[in-house]
Amino acid sequence: MVKRNRRVNVFYCVGWLLFAFLVSCQPVTSFAQEKNQNEDVVDPDRSIAKLIPDCKALAGSPPMVMNLTDLFAETAVGTENPLELTVAHNKKEKVAAASIEAGKLTLEWGKVGKTEITIRARNPKTGKFVDVRFNVAVWHPDYSKLIMTVIGGLGIFLLGMKNMSEGLQAIAGGGLRRMISAVTDNRIMAVGVGTLVTTLVQSSSITTVMVVGFVNSGFMNLSQAIGVIMGANIGTTITGWILALKIGKYGLPLLGLGAFGYLFVRKDRVRYLALAIMGLGMVFFGLELMKNGFSVIKELPDFEAWFARFDASTYFGVLKCAAVGCLLTFIVQSSSATLGITISLAAIGVIPFETAAALVLGENVGTTITAWLASLGATTNARRAAYFHVVFNILGVLWVTALFGKVFIPAVNQMLDLAFIQRLAGVDAAGVNVTVKIAAVHTTFNVINTLLFFPFASMLGRLLERIIPQRDVKERPHLTSLDIRMLETPVIAIEQSRVEVLRMADGCNKMMDWLAELTPQDEPNQKLVQKLFHREEVLDAIQDEMVSFLTDMLAANLPHNVIDEARRQLRMADEYESISDYITTILKFHLKLINQGHQFTDGMKTQLAELHVIVSDYVKLVTEGYEQRAAEVITKAKTAGSEINHRVRTLRDDHLQRLTDKKVEPHVNVAFTSTLNSYRRVSDHTLNVAESLAGMK
């Protein structure tokens, strides 16, 4: 029974396999039959050739006429006898209607679409004929897609520049801050610092805004600022060389690799290296998108004719192109964005290299708008620094445009013809990439311009001092440098806010000196009194602005070391503001005692004067430690703070002993003990500053 069931199962399976085979063969047979029925029978006297390329026309274009006699004369068919040219078939005449007359093919364009046309040429004598098949298409530009692609590509490009900048800044970390603080009156060093900083932040606008802010806050003088601005112009050219790298096809892989590293790696340094790689990938991916978007323009006659107006073959043409580049950069306030657009247009052939070079020159002038805006309402020296940036770039563009076609561009081309330059640029059979040429123009212009004006920097500085004279009223450096734009570069922004903490410390030191001058006076100098009270109000304003600035900074995605430094500065600003409050409190007790017709005894005055010197030196000790970034000052600070507290307790005990020995006026008693307490509180807050510097909580 079992064997019988097995036989049944075997026959059952074989039957199903046979049925499946027959069913699967049936469609193939039908398709082959249908194909043979629809196709022309192969004729040994017929050949098929690709003599006419595929044609593509914009909707509304005039008819296209093509001479077929000359075209077919190159084949063996038409060497001896006249040809009979006919349109064999045209399946979709709505797309393009084809007709032949007197050996000429006329294509009249119709609706948007695509079709295939076959032209048959027959030799009457031999009977042989040739079929020429080609595709024709009518298209209409999708302007919305063009705009969205370009805008999307530009947005990804700029976001990539930002991410790459943030990643590089985080990796550089304290080194970048040390470079900024190392700027001296030596202009060569200042140029080097400006170049390195701009290379890391990937934006000359950010560097010049930073410089204007530093000059405005008193951290940097005009001579230092001039050197840094010159270096910033050289550093910004690195963007062009990054875009010249032949890694465009790796844009998306780099983006993905960097994104995974940034999201899933815990270590700070590796995360921000991944962020920089992700930014680089976004830069190239955005550039490719812009190229794809702009490629449509190349096929639009109206746009091509409009771009043809910007011809850099004449002096006025160069000026016109430079003006356009300047205007575009004014609008978007990013030379990197306009450089990316320029490279995209040149890479697809919409604009020639010379036009792109002239646009780049104008972009160097347009990028100065950001620093100029940052200088509005700033101190005189800050405005001079911003105006130097404008004058420096305008003068440079003027001399380059005068020598543009005859000297500058040929010199750049000769430089690119050098063997080692070509090896670095990766020259292939097609020659130097247009992106490399644009990067070379950008770098050559800024390097030569810096070398040319470097010896005359002092002269330009003096000229600006005459053009922008010092104001009659005394200017106080203020906090306009703590601008939201600085938050784009947190490593630099945290250094700027550190300068403000140091200014608060300097203000406290001055208040202690003024207090030492006022307390011995029986009739205090009212101007100095008002000056001390005004300085306390200034420190309050600085603290408020710093809290707002640092709070906004902490809301961003920052490296841990920047977060720690920001929190440390918030604490220090609060401590120094408290110190200024207690200094004014001491003066208020002194003034109140005088108004009540009382005064301290000579012994009390001597004790308070000695205590004041000790506390004042203590504040200066900790301030110098913070200025020099010396965290080890905490050791001396703890010792000195303990000595001050011990001395205050001793003075209080001596005062209580005096109260038992002789009568002391109640107002004098309150003023003395309150003054001692205020000095102790100054000491305590100073110790808090030292602990914050040492990283203690």
Image: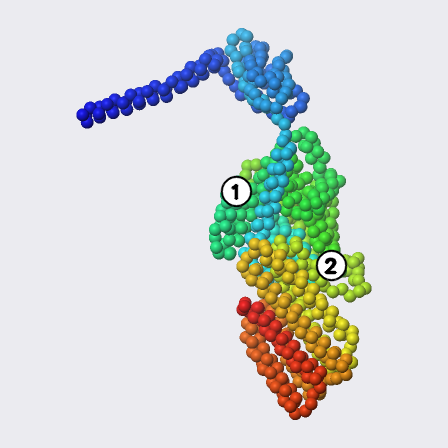
Q: Amino acid at mark 1?
A: Leu
Q: State the quadrant of the C terminus.
A: bottom right
Task: Write down the quadrant of residue 475 in the picture.
Answer: bottom right
Q: Position of residue 38 (x, y in %)?
A: 47, 14
Q: Position of residue 122 (x, y in %)?
A: 54, 11
> Left or right: where does residue 280 sit relative to residue 443?
left
Residue at which label 1 appears: 252
Task: Write down the quadrant of residue 384 in the picture.
Answer: bottom right
Rounded to the nearest angstrom, the CA distance separating label 2 from label 1 is 43 Å
Q: Is residue 198 above or below residue 29?
A: below
> Left or right: where does residue 10 sit relative to residue 396?
left
The crowd level at tag 2 (other Cα within 10 Å; few <14, some 14-19, many 20+) is many
The secondary element bearing badge 2 is classed as loop
Q: Amino acid at mark 2?
A: Ala
> Left or right: where does residue 376 sit relative to residue 553?
right
Please tell me which of labels 2 and 1 falls first in the chain.
1
Q: Is residue 55 above or below residue 671?
A: above
Task: Write down the quadrant of residue 283 in the picture.
Answer: top right
Q: Residue at x 66, y 20 (%)?
A: 63
Q: Position of residue 580 (x, y in %)?
A: 67, 71
Q: Which mark is residue 378?
A: 2
- In the image, farthest residue toward the bottom: 661
Q: Nearer the viewer, residue 408 or 105?
A: 105
Q: Position of residue 555 (x, y in %)?
A: 59, 56
Q: Residue at x 57, y 73 (%)?
A: 633
